């Protein structure tokens, strides 16, 4: 049995910023006092004249990013996901989203991955907050390679983007040579019984669940919803065709999240895709502190075994 290789998604973000900075002098980076954690400080070390440390002042950071975008720059602003989406919401809405500016927001330590700092630092609501904003694209990478490709793609996308990055080192489930296509879901595994739509770290969890279900004679298709908005409605519908049931799984609130968007799509689709669909995620709760990340995944029923149970429930 091969050992699972894990790599840092945060490091992928920092490395991608540096590579973008070398290619394009219009790339600038802003940080809200957490550069060592988000790893935007890698950009600052190489391009100090294009790196702006704003302190613990997220609203000011987004306003400054908007100003830089108005002067023709592509501004990457990063901090923890809970602060990136919540504290500067008015500035994101009024100064960035309405104006469709080239501001790229990185929400680091997303979901429950900041296990030690508890509910104040864990972003259960960032997908819903950012998805509701018109003109905002929302991305959720599954591993190191996908993070790196997404960050580079964000620089080419016209308008505001939000990417959520896990604090935990994530198992590598994509390859350096794989193509990332913005706005398109990616099938990670084929199956004929049920489809699991997963995003972020949950893609690996879904693949592990599929292996367990295969041993019980249940064949599961796994879809990586790496672009949550704009959602690939055609891809979502195509993945449901021929399936008996569907499950959505995300490390975020199920209220207004990826699962809700998938369900809306399937309901509006052809009759053959209106299959029984169950949502998995954080159910109307804040996060909490733990000694290990895995403890929180178990507490919030986001383990492969939990996905196995949910798929079986959907197939009943």
Image (cartoon, helix red, strand yellow):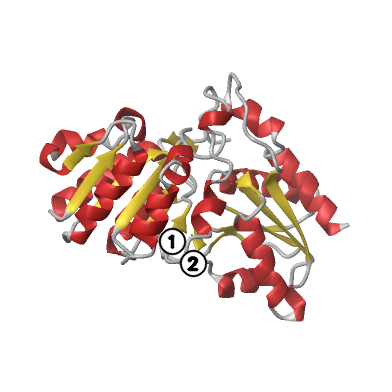
Name the spot of residue 17 as percent of width and height, x first.
Answer: 25, 46
Question: Can I make out residue 215 in this image?
Answer: no
Tell whether 298 sits left or right of 68.
Answer: right
The label on residue 137 is 1
Residue 89 vertical position relative to residue 277 in the rendered view, above or below = above
Image quarter (top left, top right, bottom left or bottom right) of the C terminus? bottom right
Asked if labels 2 and 1 touch by Cβ distance under 8 angstroms, the answer is yes
At 67% from the left edge and 68% from the top edge, which residue is drawn?
Answer: 264
For mark 2, what is the residue? 230
Q: In the displayed orientation, state which residue is furthest to the bottom.
A: 270
Tell whether 102 sits left or right of 195.
Answer: left
Question: Can I make out residue 79 in this image?
Answer: yes
Give the class, few, some or many, for how many residues have Cα within 10 Å of label 2's Cα (few <14, many ≥20): some
Q: Earlier along the polypeptide chain: callout 1 or callout 2?
A: 1
Tell whether 149 sits left or right of 19.
Answer: right
Q: In the displayed orientation, state which residue is furthest to the right.
A: 316
Give the class, few, some or many, for how many residues have Cα within 10 Å of label 1's Cα (few <14, many ≥20): many
Gap between marks 1 and 2 measured at Cα: 6 Å
Residue 158 vertical position relative to residue 145 in the rendered view, above or below = below
Count of marks overlaid on the render: 2
Residue 241 vertical position relative to residue 30 in the rendered view, above or below = below
Name the spot of residue 148 as percent of width and height, x first.
Answer: 34, 49
């Amino acid at each position: 049995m091969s050992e699972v290789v894990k790599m840092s998604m945060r490091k992928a973000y920092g490395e991608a910023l540096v590579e973008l900075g070398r290619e394009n002098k219009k790339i600038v980076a802003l940080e809200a006092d957490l550069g060592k954690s988000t790893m935007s400080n890698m950009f600052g070390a190489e391009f100090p004249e294009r790196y702006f440390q704003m302190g613990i002042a997220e609203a000011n950071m987004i306003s400054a990013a908007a100003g830089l975008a108005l002067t023709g720059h592509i501004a990457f602003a990063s901090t923890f996901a809970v602060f990136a989406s919540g504290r500067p919401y008015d500035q994101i809405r009024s100064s960035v989203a309405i104006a469709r500016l080239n501001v790229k927001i990185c929400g680091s330590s997303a979901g429950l991955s900041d296990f030690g700092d508890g509910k104040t630092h864990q972003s259960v609501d960032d997908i819903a907050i950012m998805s509701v904003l018109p003109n905002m694209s929302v991305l959720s990478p599954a591993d190191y390679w996908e993070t790196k490709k997404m960050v580079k793609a964000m620089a080419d996308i016209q308008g505001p983007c939000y990417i959520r990055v896990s604090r935990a080192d994530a198992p590598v489930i994509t390859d350096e040579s794989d193509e990332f296509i913005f706005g398109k879901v990616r099938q990670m595994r084929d199956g004929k019984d049920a489809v699991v739509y997963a995003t972020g770290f949950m893609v690996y969890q879904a693949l592990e669940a599929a292996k367990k279900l295969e041993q019980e004679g249940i064949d599961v298709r796994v879809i990586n919803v790496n672009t949550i908005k704009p959602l690939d409605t055609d891809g979502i519908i195509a993945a449901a065709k021929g399936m008996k049931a569907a499950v959505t799984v995300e490390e975020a609130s199920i209220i207004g999240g990826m699962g809700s968007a998938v369900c809306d799509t399937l309901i509006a689709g052809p009759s053959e895709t209106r299959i029984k669909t169950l949502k998995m995620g954080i159910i109307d709760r804040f996060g909490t502190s733990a000694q290990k990340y895995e403890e929180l995944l178990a507490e919030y029923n986001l383990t492969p075994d939990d996905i196995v149970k949910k798929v079986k429930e959907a197939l009943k």
